[in-house]
Amino acid sequence: MIKRKLLLALSGLALAASMSVQAQVKIGVMASSTGPIAFVGIPQKNAVALLPKKIGEYSIEYLVFDDASDPTQSVQLTKKLLGENKIDALIGPSGSGNAMGVLAFMAEGQTPMLAPVGTSAVVLPMDDKKRWVFKTHPNDDVISEGVVAAMTKRGVKTVGFIGRNDPYGENWYKTFAPMAEKAGIKIVANERYNQQDTSVVAQALKLIAAKPDAIFVAGVAADAALPHAQLTDSGYKGPIFQTHGAASGAFIKIGGKKVEGALIVGPLLAVPNEIPDSFPTKKITLDMVNSYEKQFGSPPPIFAAGTYDAGLLLIRAIPEAGKKGKPGTQEFRTALRDALEGTKEMLASQGVITMTAKDHSGFDHRGRVLMTVKDGKFAMVHD
């Protein structure tokens, strides 16, 4: 009898241990915390500390890797995470180019990818590969609508465009150009620059020579400050608009007084002390900002929000997926993809998310605001 009870007890312990293992969800995180885009990857990696370690009955394990900003390493790590670690989902990679390079592998592995990147090209146009990807920043069209509206309100009829010579800049031009045309705004100059450039004076002079009413820069953080500053140095006096990619302290740090007056359509988290009570996401945005600042001693760049909102999406989706499969199985990963696509009216730090089969970003206008740089800080424009 004693032996039987001992066997039953051991069997129960084994079953409990087995259930514990089965209830563990593995989330890969790929953040470029070293290399040229470390300014993006470091806050993304930092934000992992704010993500939940338990969701419902499931414990969550985050497997964090640095791809050193190298697209080749992004692919190698993706294969490792899928093959060896058997992750249930991936948050990352950091760069737009890196993310584009791993799409096919995530689709082949039939594993959801939550991409905290700028370019909408990771989810548009939708196809069999991109259906496994969910972008955790607003799509360019959401921000572009705000930019065009601000230009129209200021009587802009002609604009010069300068964007990064990469998927971010190219997708921005493809998004902005038809919207501007529809609003009666003509693009009179179209230039590009590289992230590593130290001078864009030639492009700045071409833009100024076209005599536009305004200039629009599609850059990210510090590199967005370069064309802005050199346009100012070259004597341009008109308004200069920026994408949400410029809503970073690095933009102000590098640009200094030369970027004062910049007009940026970006997220509420850049102006946490000015968020109106009418915004439904105010509490979540402030929770994110305060938690990050308490943990790391500085306000979160926009890049941290992509990781944070990926966590919020998983909080909703993982329990739903668990109804159809166990973590570590294809049934669970497929159900997780379906649950992410089924997200409706979810409040996030950057706005409200409603996914559809065709829209795997899902943010609407409720998280964007028009900002300017005033006295070395971001400030809301009230008009």
Image (spheres, rainbow, N blue to C red):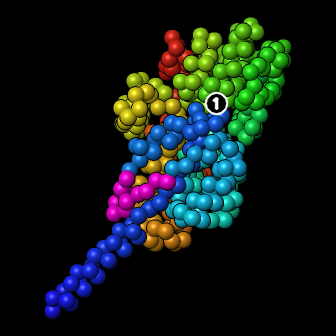
Q: Residue at x 21, y 84 (%)?
A: 6
The rendered magenta stretch, by its main secondary structure, is classed as strand
Is 181 or 219 nearer to us in this picture? 219
Q: Residue at x 64, y 36 (%)?
A: 35
On screen, residue 7 versus residue 43, left or right, reads: left
Q: Which residues are magenta?
A: 53-63
Identify residue for label 1: 220
Specify the quadrant of the image occupied by residue 59: bottom left
Residue 105's place in the image compared with 269, above or below, is below
All told, the count of numbered labels is: 1
- As helix, strand or loop, the secondary structure at mark 1 comes to loop
Residue 161 in magenta stretch: no
User: Where's residue 119, x and y in %?
Assistant: 66, 41
Is any part of residue 76 visible from this angle?
Answer: yes
Is 45 or 4 nearer to us in this picture? 4
On screen, residue 383 versus residue 272, left or right, reads: right
Q: Residues within 10 Å of mark 1 (few under 14, many from 20)?
A: many
User: Where's residue 352, x and y in %?
Assistant: 48, 43
